[in-house]
Amino acid sequence: MSLPGPPFVQKLFAGDRLAREAVTLLAPESHPADLALADTADLGREIGDRGEGLYRRGCLPGSPAWEYEDCLEFAESIELWRSAIVVPGSPSFNEKVQKAFHLAEAGFGMLGRLGPRLAALRWCCCLCWLAARAQVVDNASAAGCFGTLDTSGSAAACRDAKGAIFEWLRNLTKEAAVAAIFDFDLIGHGVWHTGGREPLPKEAKNEWFRRGTEYDMASLCRQALALPPMDMNASQAVLLLRQSYGSPNWVLPPQEAARHILEKHDWYAEMRQAPIDEMPSKPHLEGLVLHAERPPVPEPDLDDPEVIAKIERGEALGKGLQEDGLPGAIHGSIGLLYAALCFQESVANLRLYPGLLEIEGLVESLLHYGPPFRALDFRGCQGLVDDTFLRLLPLAGQNLIFLDLGECKICDSHVDSLVDALEGLPSLEHLDLASNELDCTAASRLLSALNHRRVDVASIRLDGNPLGNIDEFRDDIALTLSSRGHQVEAGGELVVHLGGSHALRWKAAPRGGSFADRARGTGDRPPIRCTAVKVVRRAAEKRYEQLEEESGKDTNMHLPARRAFVERKQQANKAILDHPIMEVWKRQVDSIHLPDEGDKPSIVGSAAEVTMTPHQARAMLE
């Protein structure tokens, strides 16, 4: 009796790369690059957990605007998927996935509130894509055996699934409530039907709900565009927004709305080339940098009679469109729109100014829901970088290479939180802490903690800090950097920039797998056990004496066979004494000299440290 094989879902994700595209539809911050890191053996369970999260917590977990809505079809669809990922055969797996997809589609149609509907739509789009791929695989497979897929059938399945997703998105953007949310922030002319102007949904007066909906719609439309085939993208979902009388209506793809909303309300978002004037202490960034800052305080029109009347009555002039509840409100949810902009324009380098850090929740939402950043620059945010802020830095993702915290008043009290944050950034190479308040003790403690926790960065900039005597500081950290050099993989380096011509650099550890690395016992392969050459020579000399003594006492030396045996052993021993390594050792021993009578000999070079591996010793014997 044969035992059942592994679940078929593992073979699906391992053998069909297109099936893994469904994972990107489950979260607005998902990126196609995430598929390269996906564990196909556990992907089925992860999809079920994400579906459960969509049902319970929505597309933006933790959002204060989320309201749960019960849906039996949505819940049953998740349970059907969980039961599908444990079956070993293709037919039963495909049957369960098809049922789960139809239940997900029914759940999307049954829900009423916009937030739960968007969550259900994501789950429905994911299962639609998986159902299409499962059907193609089942047509070519038998039982638990993964077959060779038909190319034309695979392309047709992708086309049908993408067409269904586009149809759902087009219908959603045509809904009056969705169009009213975008119109409120973009134009303000309203959405009109035969019955009059469509009111803004009540929950959309909450900034987290309104901007979260805009971000989620933009992300889902962008993710759908990335699905194959690309020739269908001309039929993407668009918003039709009413313009002023006499102007044509505005046809706007949702993924492009973030830039227009930010610019309309004077949020600063400008792409600039990275400067090169501070190299080499500050590494050069590849590509453009997005500079982001909050809008200026609105200036009232002092010629406006209404404004004049308010001044005469002593009333506050207010904040204009930046009042709470209005489209330009200064609110942390604007970080979601910056995140959508970064995704749409492929922003990898980000420069945030102090005004944005003052807005509660903005940096957290931007880092959490934005793309993987390569560089983050918070230079000049004095007094705003505290322990709470530092704990948010790991949200930037696993790809962060450059972090600039210069001129942020970082002092000794921030060292522990800073090291904790850096530990969560495994790819970080350059850390800029210039012009802060780190004294000699704090900087030494920082470098020691980085060394102890194996946080491997290539350069740290410390110029402008009150380090005191630079020479004394370099002596204090020399031992720390030396011990670090034995722990870090080859090819790395650590340069501590101290300002001017002062810098400290540690020597990299040997290349992995090399003789020096194996001799240290730090590599994956077993360490090399070395033997001193002088020990081998003494053993050979002692063996030579033993052979001479034994041959003199041996009564069988007159026999040809015995005499030939002893001669072979003597020749092998002589080969050791005449080996080139022995010649090198003897030349180094000859360098021993006695400068004055009675003094101890001094050794020039390192003759006593010359070693050989067992392989070299065997080669000498051969």
Image (cartoon, rainbow, N blue to C red):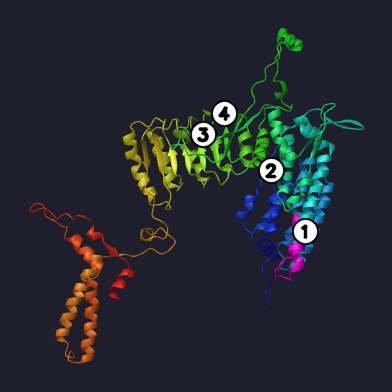
User: What amino acid is labelled 4 in the image?
Assistant: Pro
User: What residue sits 54% from the left and 43% below the top?
Assistant: 400
Residue in front for this viewpoint, 573 or 364 = 573
Viewed as shown, does residue 412 lie left or right of 363?
Answer: left
Percent of width and height locating residue 458: 44, 44
Circle 2 residue: 61
Mark 4 neighbour density, 10 Å: few (under 14) some (14–19) many (20 or more): some
> Dot 1 corresponds to which residue?
157
Q: Which residues are magenta?
A: 129-153
> Which residue does the image show at 73% across and 12% down from the upper left?
307
Report the front residue among 390 and 588. Answer: 588
Question: Which residue is more in the foreground, 419 or 381?
Answer: 381
Q: Amino acid at mark 1?
A: Ala
Q: Residues within 10 Å of mark 2 (few under 14, many from 20)?
A: few
Q: To which residue does mark 3 refer? A: 275
Q: Quadrant of residue 506?
A: top left
Query: Residue 155: image x %, image y %?
Result: 75, 59
Residue 70 visible in the picture:
no
Residue 81, image quadrant: bottom right
Would you place residue 259 above or below residue 454 in this image? above
